[in-house]
Amino acid sequence: MNTYFIKRFIARTAVVLSAAALFCGCSDDDETSTLHFDKPEVVIGPESSTASFILRSDTSWKLHSDADWFTLNLTKGAKSASVIITYSENTSMTEKRTAVITATTLSGDASDSFILSQMPVESYIRLETEALPISATAAHHEIAVETSVDSGIDLSVSYGDEEGGAWIENLTLADGKLAFDAGENGSSERRIAVISLLYQDEFGRTTEAAVRITQSFSMNPSAATEKDFAFAAALGTGDVEENVYVTGQIVLDGRNANFPNRRYSIQDAEGRALLFESTIDLGVARNDRVRLWLLGSTVKEVAEGTFTYKVFTGIAAEHIMQKEAGSPVQPREVYIRDLTDEMLFSLVRLRDVEIAMPYGGLVNYDEYYVSGGGVNVYGKNLTKYYGTCLRDINGDHLYMLTNFGVDYRRHSLPMGSGTVTGILTREYNSNFGEMGAFQIRHLTQAEIALDPSRENSFSKVLVEWTCVKPAGFKEGVTHVAPTTGPASASLYKSNADGFYNAFLAGSGRIYSRTLDRPFPAGSGPIYFGNKPRGDVDSNGQGTANTVKGGGMYSALWDTDTYWLISNVSTSGIRSQLSLQIETNSLLATGPRDFVVEYSTDGTSWTAVPGGSYTVIGQCDSKNALPHYMPGFKVFDFALPAALQDKASVSIRLRCASLTGTDGKSSVVPNATNRLGHVSIKYNK
């Protein structure tokens, strides 16, 4: 909204009958017309917008102004009228611009005018930070400043404890830096100062900025007592007042691209870990043995969904009491089923694991959405990472997380099995959905120690559909054979009208692009669409990584519709069987809830234990909401022993409800569910 400063004064034409006029015989019909503005002046803000005024008149009139930075919706009229001014932005940072709008009767016997004034752009002062923690030692400090003001900014300091006296000195603002000297804090308490920057322009407008300086209290590390990690983990939130330290080895050094910057983890000999953060690079390296002083730090609680954990913040250089190079930390080697809360944020090595769907890269989504033009559309709803599904020889699984900033994220995935070493975490990302109790974050590519060959894995593919359109594909087929495995096995969808190249949607109906005919009511095509693949670069810029015809897309969903994998023989197999699927759905109204069911006779169906899964929505340029992501998600399911050594096995992925992916909407008839991969494996 514009702020108007209105000055009221009398500027109207008066009708005067003089004695001389009476003597000249003038009649009442010769009276002057009434014409005046409702305000003498309007002052508007610098941004482009509209304003209005009222012109009061009892006759015909016209308006005039020589200015070209605004327009009037009316320039002439009869009797009183409301006139709208549409004005452009005043980009000047110093100059106020004015214009005179004049009203004149057509007869020329009366006129009035008012002034339109537009203020310049307001000045700004921006500080690099609004809060700066500093150590107790005397030191010089600088904070970067951006401002539109060349001079005239007033600097002042206020203190939280007036009895402590002034301890900020030599306060200056020059060359884009706010600089000051902080004296040594010899007391046993923190002290706080606020540095304020104030500017008032010639029009009386003020611009302010401030930074809060928190100085640590004097600490004596020589008097500190060593405590174990259990003691540190039990400390409550808030400032640490105990003069204590812990000893351990660094496993996360604050510079790893797969973790937040300046996030550290220290681990003791029993494998317990503590997280800590700093505003600076502490200069520690992985495997360094350090004494970490805790006095003067602050314990912060961080929430990941319903799970909370503690982080020691405000760690400064002086908190590293001692460091020395140490031998490599030996991670605990475990199976996925052996993971416990006590291992969180420590270094672990997962045994006998493989990537459930080993196609693409570690970040298997379309990077357009997190780089280039996509950033402007998706903003804060960008996915933080991609979760690669790992499964182990026991039939258990978890997600291995990879940040977008990892430089090897687009290397092709190894297809064999081995070990994966990394930091055990528990995280929640609304874009990616539920990820189970634990996740693992790798620290180096070498620690994803999986054999590159699928032949060298603990599992073997029984059947697999990569969902890429087969060579020699003919439209209209109702079943497709697997990419790998016997051709007698098949994949199709209930109430489908066959597989097709593509589709066109219009008026609520789905059409075959090549056959150009509507599908019968209650049926529809399965068409081959595109899907993200992290090791593909389709535009040469590393942002459009999609596979053409790399997914099976199907609409028309209800609780009695399903994808069906049929005629799969498990004869002679008496080891662990598993199912892998890669899937997503259409935006808010695509089907969300599915369940995996199996049958050995094609008639009676049984739910696979733990076989319910929640599908995420595929975002697009109009629907970048927090629960969507620009890719598919992989699910892994251990299949029951009842499916071993059977002549024919069927598995279906059945829509279990009419709830859409947003958790609120109902599934609409033309909403799509997609498959990017389907496979059944068994342990060798």
Image (spheres, rainbow, N blue to C red):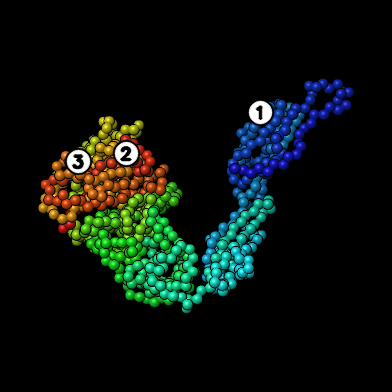
Look at 61% across and 33% down and name the residue there: 73
The residue drawn where x is 70% and y is 30% is 56
Q: Is residue 492 above or below residue 320?
A: above
Q: Earlier in the sequence, mark 2 or mark 1?
A: 1
Q: Nearer the viewer, residue 14 or 602?
A: 602
In what element is the residue under mark 2? loop
Q: CA distance from mark 2 to mark 1?
A: 60 Å
Gap between marks 3 and 2 measured at Cα: 26 Å
Label 3: state its secondary structure.
loop
**Disc 1 to disc 3, C-alpha distance:** 74 Å
**Residue assigned mark 3:** 479
Q: Which residue is mark 1?
A: 77
Graded by Cα atoms within 10 Å as few (under 14), some (14 to 19) or many (20 or more), the crowding at tag 2 reads many
Q: Nearer the viewer, residue 539 or 528?
A: 528
Q: Is residue 50 above or below residue 609?
A: above
Query: What amino acid does circle 2 point to?
Result: Leu
Task: Identify residue type, mark 3.
Answer: His
Query: x and y percent of residue 200 in the render?
Result: 66, 55
Asked whether disc 3 touches disc 2, contact meaning CB atoms under 8 Å apart, the reply is no
Check residue 658 in the rendering and tell me which mark sits there, or answer none: 2
Image quadrant containing the N terminus: top right
Decide which of tag 1 and tag 3 comes sooner along the chain: 1
Percent coordinates x, y for residue 146 in the rendering: 57, 59
Callouts 2 and 1 close, C-beta under 8 Å: no
Q: Secondary structure at mark 1?
A: strand
Residue at the spot 64% in from the left edge and 36% down from the top edge: 52
Badge 3 density bin: few <14, some 14–19, many ≥20, Cα 10 Å: some
Identify the mark nearer the N-term, 3 or 2.
Answer: 3
**Kind of residue sitting beneath label 1:** Gly
Q: Nearer the viewer, mark 3 or mark 2?
A: 2
Q: Is residue 308 above or below residue 599?
A: below
Residue 559 appears in which quarter of the rendering? top left
